[in-house]
Image (cartoon, grey):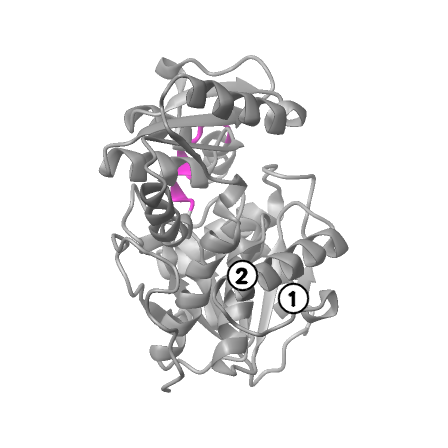
Amino acid sequence: MTVPGFTPGIIARIQFAHLPTPVEVLPRLTAALKGPKIFIKRDDQTGLAMGGNKTRKLEFLLAEAQAHGAHTLITAGAIQSNHCRQTAAAAARFGLGCILVLSAEPPVEPPEQASGNLLLDYLLGAQVVWCRREERDAVLQHTFETAWTGGRRPYLIPYGGSNPTGAAAYAHAMQEFLDQDTPVDWILFPSSSGGTQAGLLVGARKAGWKGHILGISVDEERQVLAERVAALANATAERLGLAETFLVQDILVDDGYLGEGYAVMGEAEREAIRLFAAAEGILLDPVYTGRAAAGMIGLIRQGFFKPEDRLLFWHTGGTPALFADVYREQLSKGA
């Protein structure tokens, strides 16, 4: 399938991700679930410090940072943030400093006890500033101001890299997928900060793709996330020079798989992780792709999709979190 491309040069980009990421069919998973045919888009293979969807966004965000003469990248996330790990890797690759504002309840893990993404943050040379989650925005702003007055020329990347510049990466990613000529009816993925979903919507609208883009919420109620995605999709379309408008009712979000809360792995996530691993040799993470896969599995079992539908699970990465002590111990039980 050939679809219209974007005009080159609208947003600056530094190309370092391993693209295009593969699209694969999952025959054993399809058979195990006795449902629609399932494909997967492997954005866990983007190549930056074990990959993930944030690498695409960082191609655009790094270009913007360099245009502003930045010497230091600053961003924020949870203790096992995939976004922070990839930001630290991008900073290391391009010779920039990196400060991560990570939220966690005390006690904070010292470097010698770090595991999962946090261990990689330290290995990649990031400076970590700790705070409680409710203090994160204030601490992030203070950290930026301190770095600025200290002459470190910081560039602030928002939570999840989800601003119009970062989300534009997934408008381009949608174009990439359509060029791979794998007809599907539904695209499913984890949605939280909204950038991936907003970008996919913009790319789909630009290309005239008529399928369904369904975000499985990992932490927000449907209305909150839909409003966030619609606002970001509109801002992203404007950033790309597209005359498109997205309404809240255009945004498909399923919030039925929030479990016990953000980053709390339950039985549904454990089943999804084990099923993908045993059936297809593909590793999911406990927070994002594990929850989104649990949602997809649940919807298939409920008969939500038609038997003739073709589903694409967009793997957004996050594998290092599997090796965080809290998740590793839970997954090893009964293995």
Residue 316 shown left or right of residue 210 in the figure? left
Magenta region includes residue 156:
no
Residue 324 picture location, percent across and down: 44, 30
Going by the numbered disc 2, the residue's amino acid type is: Thr
Q: Residues within 10 Å of mark 2 (few under 14, many from 20)?
A: many
Q: Quadrant of the N terminus?
A: bottom left
Residue 41 picture location, percent across and down: 40, 65
**Location of mark 2 (residue):** 236
Residue 107 picture location, percent across and down: 55, 12
Residue 113 picture location, percent across and down: 39, 16
In this rendered view, identify the residue nearer to me: 99 or 252: 99
Rendered residue at 51%/62% (across/down): 199
Magenta residues span: 318-326
**Vertical relation: 12 (above or below) 299:** above
Rendered residue at 55%/60% (across/down): 197
Query: Which label is found at residue 299?
Result: 1
Q: Is residue 234 visible?
A: yes
Which one is in front in this view, the residue at disc 2 or the one at disc 1? Answer: 2
Magenta region includes residue 321:
yes
Q: Quadrant of residue 294?
A: bottom right
